[in-house]
Structure formats: C-alpha cells, structure tokens
Image (cartoon, rainbow, N blue to C red):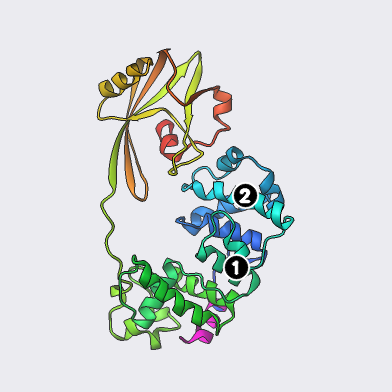
Amino acid sequence: MEIEKLESWYNKNRRELPFRLFKDPYRIWVSEIMLQQTQVDTVLPYYDRFLKVYPSVVELAQTSEETLHKMVEGLGYYRRFGNMLLAAREIVEKHGGKFPNTYDEIRALPGIGKYTAGAILSIAYNQPYSALDGNVIRVLSRYLGIQGDMRQEKNRKHLDTINQSLIEKAHPEIYTQAVMELGALVCKPTKPFCAECPLRETCFAFAHQAVEDYPEISKTKAKRILHFVTFILRKDGQLLLKKREENLLKGMYLYPQLEADHLEEALNAMERTGVRLSISRHRGIVKHVFSHQTWVMDVYEAEVLKGMPEGCILVSDQAFEKLPMAVAHKKIVM
C-alpha cells in the first residue's frame, strides 16, 4: 500500500472532529465507545455534553449507572456504557486515575476489545496496533482484492494481520485514522468516489472494475419481529416503570409490556399473576427497529386496580423526567 499517499491525503482532507483535537487517551476512548454502531453526526452532540460533565475518568468513575444512562439516552446499545463505567472505576482503583498505556492493561478493561485497544494505542500513544473496523475492512479488501466472507472470523483475522503489517511501516496515529477516514468519506459501501481516492492507481478492485464486489459479506438473517402489548400504567397517581436487566437496553427504563398478540392475551397473563387493570385508552401501534429485531407495540393506557406487575416501581411524574428511558418507549409518548 502507498502509505505515504494515504497519510498525506488524510492530513489535507480529514474532517475536523472534536476527538481529533487532543491525544488524550480518555477522550479517544470515549469517542470510540460512542462510535460503536453509531454514526459520527449522531455522536457529536453527545460527545461534547459528555465531556463537559465528565472531563476526566475520575469524574466519570464517580457517577451512577442511572445518571450515566440518562446522559446517553437515545444513543442505543447501552451495555457499552455500563462497561464504560466499570472500566472508569477500574482505572481509578488500579491505575490511580491514569489511563493505561499497554495493550494488555487496556484489553483487560471491561468493554474494550481488540479494535478499541488498537484505536486507543495507535491514535493516543502512536503505538503500532491494528484497529480493524468496517471501514478498514472495506478499504483493504478492495485495495488488495482479498476475497472471503468478512462475517467469518478467519477472514477478518487475515485482514487484521495485514493491517498490522501495514501500521508497523506507518505513522500509527495518522495511519489508523487515515484508513478509517478514507472508508468513511471516499471508499463508501456503495457508489464510492474512486476518482478522489489517493490509492486508486494501485487499487485491485478499481483496476478490475469490481469495486462494489468487495468486501464479500454474507446476508444476515431476517430481523425477528416481536409483538408486545405495552401498558402506560398508573397507580395512586404514579407511573409504573420497569428497569431492563436483559442485555438489550440493559439499565434503561421501560413501560411494562408482555409479548402477546392482542390485549386479551396480555390481560389474562396479568390476571394470572394477581394484577388487574382498567383500560382507559388505546394509544395505537408503535414500531421500533433494532439492529437484529423489530418491536411492534400495541400501546394502552390503564389504571392498576389490584396487585403490582413483577419488577415494576412507582415513579412520580417529576422523577420520571430524570430516569433514562429506552428510545423504543420514548416514542410512545412523542
């Protein structure tokens, strides 16, 4: 690969993003966690607010999980932020509040995998560690003409080995960001801007007019569709909410809901647990699409006449405003 051309292109064409203004490993870590499965434009306002409240890992370690989840409400994939809090506390307890600078120490932190460790080490510390994400996979597979389904671990490992050999010949802090930026701005998944690419003259896919044939990625299974009856419940003038414990939306609050095809089925299930409701209003159908499943929620307002749904808490309207709500359920009252 023509590494000098790539790095020169990056220095002239890179976006001026806030997490590129500093080499602070804490700030880079925060950006990498937020950017997981999330677009840059979505992350930017959260990133700025986050660092105003938590300017260092020490302040982050002192917050509560609920407060942190409220801060990032709307970004989705909330398990990453629970891990972030655990990692921050570990950095304070084991490393005196200073972000570690070795691969093994960084990888040992909760929620940090090979990619994130590589990104932090290369960008913040200028150490040659591969950071292989979707953009890098696309650029390298096209440039080198590497075949094989990139959903398969063996093929990603092969590319990771190649990326490691390249970064060892480059300026790590520039190279890592340059390959990612090329994938984000030029070497796009569809209709890439090959005429603007600094590597086009030696790109295998471009030379063979096969750019959109790379990378090979097998189709995912169809999204699972789940049907819920969702209740906006009140008891003694307060709302009922349930804190989610499952990995999906873990730590976020939801209205009580049951997987059911219709209201009668849900009410019967409630009655079997000693809970009786009085339905006051039908809100209609609300859909929310996750990466791997879709929720179809039939929403009703109701009063609790007897009992208490398992795992629910009573919340005043004032307290409700301070709790982190899952976007899937925030849609219900929008």
Mark 2 touching mark 1, by CB under 8 A? no
Q: Residue furthest top?
A: 305
Q: Secondary structure at mark 2?
A: helix
Q: Residue at x 69, y 44 (%)?
A: 62
The residue positioned 33% from the left and 72% from the top of the image is: 215
At mark 1, the secondary structure is: helix
- Quarter of the image for residue 112 reads bottom right
Q: Amino acid at mark 1?
A: Tyr
Between the C-alphas of marks 2 and 1, the distance is 26 Å
Against 72, residue 114 (above or below) is: below
Q: Nearer the viewer, residue 110 or 242?
A: 110
Is any atom of residue 251 visible in this view? yes
Residue situated in front as seen by the camera: 108 or 197:
108
Looking at numbered disc 2 in the image, what kind of residue is underneath it?
Phe
Residue 47 rendering spot, x and y as whole percentages: 59, 53
Residue located at (51% from left, 84% from top): 3
Residue 48 is situated, as x and y percent measured from the top left of the image, at 62, 53
In which quadrant of the rendered image does the N terminus lie? bottom left
Determine the image quadrant of residue 103. Answer: bottom right
> Mark 2 or 1 closer to N-term?
2
- What residue sits right under mark 2 in the picture? 50
Q: Which residue is mark 1?
A: 103
Q: Tell me the quarter of the picture where residue 221 sits.
A: bottom left
2 vs 1, front mark: 1
Residue 199, x across and y down, in percent:
43, 84
Query: In x, y percent, where is residue 24?
Result: 67, 64
Prevailing secondary structure class for the magenta stretch in the rendered image:
helix
Determine whether 234 is above or below 244 in the image: above
Examine the structure image and report whether residue 113 is included in the region drawn in magenta: no
Q: Which residues are magenta?
A: 1-11
